[in-house]
Amino acid sequence: MYCKYSDHMKEECGVFGIFGSEEASVLTTLGLHSLQHRGQEGAGIVSFDGNNFHSIRKQGLVGDNFNNTEILSQLPGKNAIGHVRYSTTGNSKPENLQPFFANLALGGFSCAHNGNLTNTNSLRKKLVENGSIFQTTTDTEIILQLVALSKKKTLTDKLIDALQQIQGAYSLVILTNKKLIGVRDPYGIRPLVLGDKDGSPVLASETCALDMVGAKYIRDIENGEIVIITDSGIESIKPFVKLKERPCIFEIIYFASPDSIVGGRTVYTYRKALGEQLALENKIDADVVVPIPDSGVSAAIGFSQKSNIPFELGIIRSHYVGRTFIEPSQTIRQFGVKLKHSVNRSCIENKRVILIDDSIVRGTTANKIVKMVYDAGAKEVHLGVSCPPIKHPDFYGIDTPNYNELIASHTNIEEMTKLIGATSLFFLSLEGTYKAMGCTERDSQQPQFTDHCFTGDYPIDVSEILKINSKNG
Ligand code: AMP
């Protein structure tokens, strides 16, 4: 019988893969370490030693689970892929940890996925009706099932056949007994880069993982591209209808590591430019600019430099607490915000403070911090946000919640200012956001980025998910 999966995956993840290295699993561990900001719920590595596949998947941080000297003997082989993940309610199950592995007719097939598919429910329904048995609630398992069931002859053709049936955002790393494969969806919504570690090709979500393992950056995997890495070299195929690339703008605004390079610039320089642009658009009389750490730091530096208002570390962040969104319920999340930030009174007392953060989602962080800053004796607390209001949910792999939880989807700026309790609240304009990204303007016909969280312009149809969400209230 068809089973409805209401706990549809919402996750942001990081992937890594390396081919032909004596230290494949150690380098994968290091790569995953540097991608830890993309997911802290669990991590996994699958390696292949020429005969067998080996797998370890654990809940918790990479450093807590892959920290022993026996990794090489536990995960032997010259080829490996890895994954870090987080998810929301209902999905914190060990069996959902990746990479997944299946023994297919053509041999072992392991897959790690960053992104979210948008036609999961209809595909799963069809597959279950045709006899597929699912072991997880993830959309990634659907890819495995589609590859397994494909009538095509070669593994590459089976994979293409599967990819042509799925819709949504996906950056994949796949390991078989002969190949390491990297895939980026037709819009290139989630990132994937190719590097080289002393002659061994590397795939990673971000360039910071290449830096971590001492690999040279070669290039980005293009949107709609499949790269197939074998002993004979790297082959590239583009089996999809060519679309204009539209990477997710939120990777640059929030998700990616500041030291990662996107389009030739570090993410840090984009974020600083977002802060500069915010200062150009909003002239505020104040004594100090204070970032909400860590996410607001780069934009606050840009804001301070452009406005000539001194930058101060007025909020201190504990580095022993994970990202706010990782906790699965709103109650725990609120508690998490308090655990995470404390006030540095000396920078705040009797001052007119401009707080800077990269984004407001539910408003939980902003609300708590504005109150903390007032309680510490600030005269005024202005809050500047270095992106536009997030009015629309994400279904492509960034975990922003449903409409009713997004504060900007149901309140205007005046109401939000009151709810958050700030003296004033200001957001970067959409045009300003595109300027900071290095574009003269947003191309309204074919936008340069996937920016639906601000505009509602979803490049890939999300009606299937919206329908399920509305049924589930
Ligand atoms: P909220 O407290 O719900 O308004 O969330 C806003 C805070 O969460 C900001 O400090 C952001 O840096 C951070 N944030 C924004 N988007 C995400 C995301 N997708 N996952 C985790 N944290 C996020």
Image: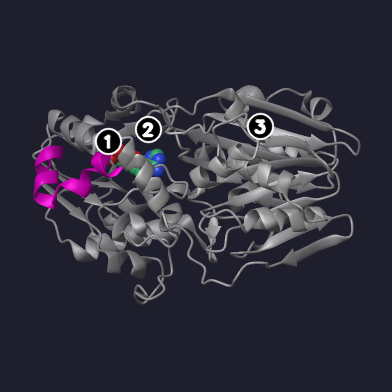
Q: Which residue is mark 3?
A: 44
How far apart marks 1 and 2 lie (CA) works out to 8 Å
Front-lying residue, 26 or 443: 443
Q: Hey, what amino acid is under mark 2?
A: Thr
How far apart marks 3 and 2 lie (CA) works out to 22 Å
State whether label 2 is within 8 Å of ligand 1.
yes
Give the mark, 3 or 2, whose residue is nearer the N terminus: 3
Left or right placement of residue 372 versus residue 213 in this view: left
Label 3 neighbour load within 10 Å: few <14, some 14-19, many 20+: many
Dot 1 lies on which element? Answer: helix
Asked whether residue 215 is in view, the answer is no
Residue at image coords 35%, 47%: 466
Residue 201, above or below 10: below
Q: Which residue is mark 1?
A: 365
Dot 2 lies on which element? Answer: helix
Q: Return the mark for residue 324.
A: 2
> Which image quadrant: the C terminus?
top left
User: Marks 2 and 3: in contact by CB < 8 Å?
Assistant: no
Q: Return the mark for residue 440.
A: none
The span shown in magenta is 402-423
What colour scheme does the image use? one colour
User: Marks 2 and 1: in contact by CB < 8 Å?
Assistant: yes
Position in image of residue 377 (x %, y %):
12, 32
Position in image of residue 80 (x %, y %):
76, 40
Give the mark, 1 or 2, whose residue is nearer the N terminus: 2
Q: Hey, what amino acid is under mark 3?
A: Gly
